[in-house]
Amino acid sequence: MGELWTDTYKFKTWLQVELAVCEAQAELGAIPEAAVEEIKAKANFDPKRVLEIETQVRHDMIAFLTNVNEYVGDAGRYIHLGLTSSDVLDTALALQLVASLDIILERLEQLCQAIRYQAQQHRHTVMIGRSHGIHAEPITFGFKLAGWLAEVCRNRDRLVHLRSEIAVGKISGAVGTYANIDPRVEAIAAQKLGLQPDNASTQIISRDRHANYVQKLALLGASIERFALEIRNLQKTDLLEVEEFFAKGQKGSSAMPHKRNPIRSERLTGIARILRSHAIAALENVALWHERDISHSSVERVILPDVCILTHFMLVEISDLVKKLLVYPENMKRNMNVYGGVVFSQRVLLALVEKGMSREDAYGIVQSCAHQAWNQANGNFQDLIAKDSRVTSQLSSEELEACFDPRHHLKHLDEVYQRLGI
């Protein structure tokens, strides 16, 4: 990924665009075919030389063209004919963004596979579901991962659509009116480059496309952050339901030898913040003066390489993290059963209502026993509810025992798995 954002690769895409335009011009008879063949045979660049020239002319495209013409010679007069700098810059940028997105999509598929595998492995690994950070009702770890998979699939679909939206070039000249370039040149050159012509460019491709690109990657980063945050929470010492793989020889603290910290998840959380900040900058790039200014340019030189490289890194990290994740089913079972099955309170409530008790009365009885168990060091909700005559007068011991069976909460999870093809 990093290679796609080097000066060498950037200049390579610039040259691709210039050659595609020359070929299109020749096909339409605007320039000699022999000149195009000579240009294609000789055209080259030296990144160091381009930067050297730029220090003098203070213009990156002129510096590039000057260097290319040092290789081509007289036929170089047909290069950049009728174009403005942004024709090349924006079209070449589209090539970089598409190439970056292709790598990201490939890595995203690897994340899908890693999550899918763990979801299959832990389809029946029962754990407690939490809301507001508080124990709620039983789920399975596989079900939690199924939610992750669904979110990753949505991100993938967004990026597939994004690819077509960003794969757009413009060869329309200064202010985009085609005054000195035939629109057919744009169509032919774009096709050669695997792009679509922008349907209404100014001197640049409007930056709403690029803002959407950055926002979609920031959204993917937010999803990865959600997964990382969940891992961090579940790795807390008092829970320890999952844990990042801790390599042999790895150390967690310079002071405390016992520490095994979720450093990769924390790193991912931090990087997601950077992506979000870049989304703001990309949105601010949309509003430019009239047909163009270059206030967006300096911003993009920072944020576009950043978002692509960081997103790629995040995908590599989270995929490996999920693949090697340590899962502790016994700890999940232990945590779920604290306070004697208090998390099954709704089942007892509904059972009492089904027997004819008012919901208000049933709620009061169940809540009283639940809070009493919750406020004791070794509180046991099931014992308390089984000793309450108001409950036992309505429910048999078998009916009451059935309320504490976690399988009731899992009976429809197969439908979720079927939707995701797991």
Image: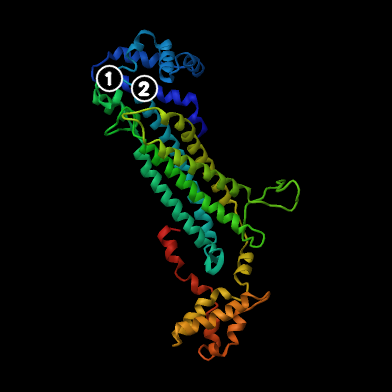
Q: Position of residue 138 (x, y in %)?
A: 53, 69
Q: Which mark is residue 85?
A: 2
Between residues 392 and 367, which one lies in front from this camera angle?
A: 367
Give, as a three-letter code, the residue at label 1: Gln
Q: Earlier in the sequence, mark 2 or mark 1?
A: 1
The answer to whether residue 272 is left or right of residue 37 is right
Residue shown at 42% from the left, 44% from the top? 216
**Circle 1: element type:** helix
90 up-or-down from 133: above or below: above
Q: Which mark is residue 25?
A: 1
User: How many neighbours does mark 2 have within 10 angstroms: few (below 14), some (14-19), or many (20 or more)?
Assistant: some
194 up-or-down from 238: above or below: above
Residue shown at 56% from the left, 53% from the top? 229
The answer to whether residue 28 is left or right of residue 110 is left
Between residues 378 and 132, which one lies in front from this camera angle?
A: 132
**Based on the displayed image, in which of its 4 quarters is residue 285 positioned?**
top left
Task: Evaluate if marks 2 and 1 touch, with contact meaning CB atoms under 8 Å apart.
Answer: no
Q: Position of residue 10 (x, y in %)?
A: 45, 26
